[in-house]
Image (tube, helix red, strand yellow):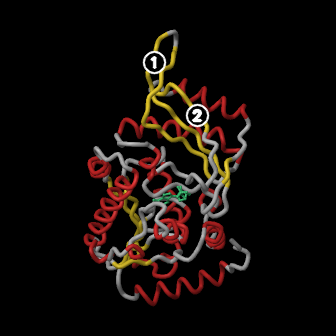
Amino acid sequence: MNHGMFDPKEFIRKSMEEIRVRVREEKAIAACSGGVDSVTATLLAHRAVGGSLSAVFIDDGLRRQGEPEFVAQLLNRIGVRYRCLDAKDSFFKGLRRKEDAEEKRKAFREIFYRKLGQIVREEGARYLVQGTIAADIAETVGGIKTQHNVLEQIGIDPKEYGFELVEPLRHLYKPEVRAVARELALPEEVSGRMPFPGPGLSVRVLGEVTPGKIEVLRKATKIVEEETRDLRAFQSFAVLLSDKATGTKNGERVYGGIMTIRVVESEDAITASVVEVPYRILFNISQRITGEIPAIARCLFDITHKPPATIEFE
Ligand code: XMP
């Protein structure tokens, strides 16, 4: 894919104009998870319509450690009015007993948009701004996986949830979104941020999602991010498998979880290649995960490119 010809200044100018013409005197709510796509979409809309826009962070209980605080600080810093909706119980309840990857994704999407519809209604808004990008649409329409933030392209009318969609980034791929984020002067910790899937850690717990498994995965995620930071990979993360394995800790038998480490390089997430992570780093990760997390007995490293695998496991 050639991303060379893109002019972020011109894109911002046109996009702001389009948002302004569309939203006019109405109110808009931006769904902001803290990732580069949603923050960029939020800021574009904020620059376009100012006080007619406010943002919402849905705390689904499936984010990385410290994420709600990160988003709150960021939105305060860039001057966007914002609220956090605690919806953890609804998400865990909706995901209960769901084991199939696509069934989980659809359940997540349904709760996500019902919650956003509720907020749009409460705020008297008409529009929902979201950071869906071209890769999300391509994967969903191509039948690879139902990304949580694609509706109209698969025949779902957002009005069913009580809003109309504003998706300023829907024709862009990741490198262009990052260029727009930099042009908007977002800090590098946002513009260069590692992608994180909309359904969060739920797509990295294989099989049924429970608060306990998410807590274990959250700890492992932090360890992997810390240990691989210097690699500056496109994505590096942990995945909790649904099987168990036998191990021994402090001379006693353990029958515990299996964590898989995935580190990939990519430009636009359409294809990805496995990073040749030095063994020293892999051993550190394995030792820390099995040492710091009692529930984990074993660590594996995934050596599958995309294709044939996808980046996420579900
Ligand atoms: P896959 O797993 O399809 O992922 O190779 C491609 C990129 O998209 C991210 N991803 C998602 N992002 N909603 C999102 O916003 C989703 O449902 C979703 N699923 C995967 C993934 O992390 C990778 O960067």
The residue located at (42%, 55%) in the rendering is 199
For the residues bearing labels 2 and 1, Cβ distance under 8 angstroms: no
Q: Nearer the viewer, residue 308 or 185?
A: 308
- Give the amino acid type for the residue marked by disc 2 in the picture: Leu
Where residue 287 sits, quadrant-wise, is: top right
Label 2 to label 1, Cα distance in Å? 17 Å
| Looking at the image, residue 179 lies above or below residue 199 | below
Q: Residue 294: x and y, percent?
A: 46, 24
Q: Residue 231: x and y, percent?
A: 71, 46
Mark 1, residues whose alpha carbon is within 10 Å: few (<14), some, or many (≥20)? some
Residue 19's tag is none
Is residue 187 at least partly visible in the picture?
Answer: no
Q: Secondary structure at mark 2?
A: strand
Label 1 within 8 A of ligand 1 by Cβ: no
Q: Residue 5: x and y, percent?
A: 72, 79
Residue 254's tag is 1
Q: Nearer the viewer, residue 88 or 304?
A: 304
Q: Is residue 5 left or right of residue 42?
A: right
The residue located at (66%, 29%) in the rendering is 283
The residue located at (55%, 40%) in the rendering is 222
The residue located at (37%, 35%) in the rendering is 212
Q: Is residue 95 left or right of residue 257?
A: left
Q: Nearer the viewer, residue 204 or 310?
A: 310
Q: Residue 104: x and y, percent?
A: 36, 52
| Looking at the image, residue 125 lies above or below residue 259 | below
Is residue 288 at least partly visible in the picture?
Answer: yes
- Give the amino acid type for the residue marked by disc 1 in the picture: Val
Mark 2, residues whose alpha carbon is within 10 Å: few (<14), some, or many (≥20)? some
Quarter of the image where the N terminus is located: bottom right
Q: Is residue 284 left or right of residue 102?
A: right
Residue 300's tag is 2
